Image (spheres, rainbow, N blue to C red):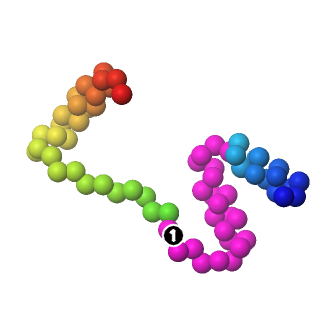
Amino acid sequence: MSVMRDELHHLVDRLPEEKVAPLLRLVRDQLDEQQAVRDLPFIGMLDAEPDFAERAEEILRAEDDHPL
């Protein structure tokens, strides 16, 4: 591996996670390849009792008291 590639690897490893995605897009653009995998956000659904939304903060506070 060249010195420049080694330095690039080291610098990328030091980046905060939120800066990795934009850099990854930049590098992929330089390769001019079609990407088969898309980075889509996670979307979830929940089936719960009707008062769940009203009690959400109470439930979260109770969960914070439990050790993992």
Establish if 54 lies above or below 24.
Answer: above
Establish if 39 lies above or below 67.
Answer: below
In the image, 15 versus 67, the foreground residue is 67
Residue topped by disc 1: 37
Of the 4 image quadrants, the one containing the C terminus is top left
**Residue 13: image location, x then y, percent:** 70, 46
Q: Which residue is located at x 67 percent, y 58 percent?
A: 23
Residue 35 as seen in the image, left or right of residue 57 = right
Q: Which residues are magenta?
A: 15-38
- Identified by mark 1, the residue type is Val
**Residue 41: image location, x then y, percent:** 43, 58
Please check the rendered image and state whether residue 1 is part of the magenta-colored stretch, yes or no: no
**Residue 26: image location, x then y, percent:** 68, 64
Residue 47 as seen in the image, left or right of residue 42 = left
Query: Picture quarter containing residue 21?
Result: bottom right
Answer yes or no: is residue 46 visible: yes
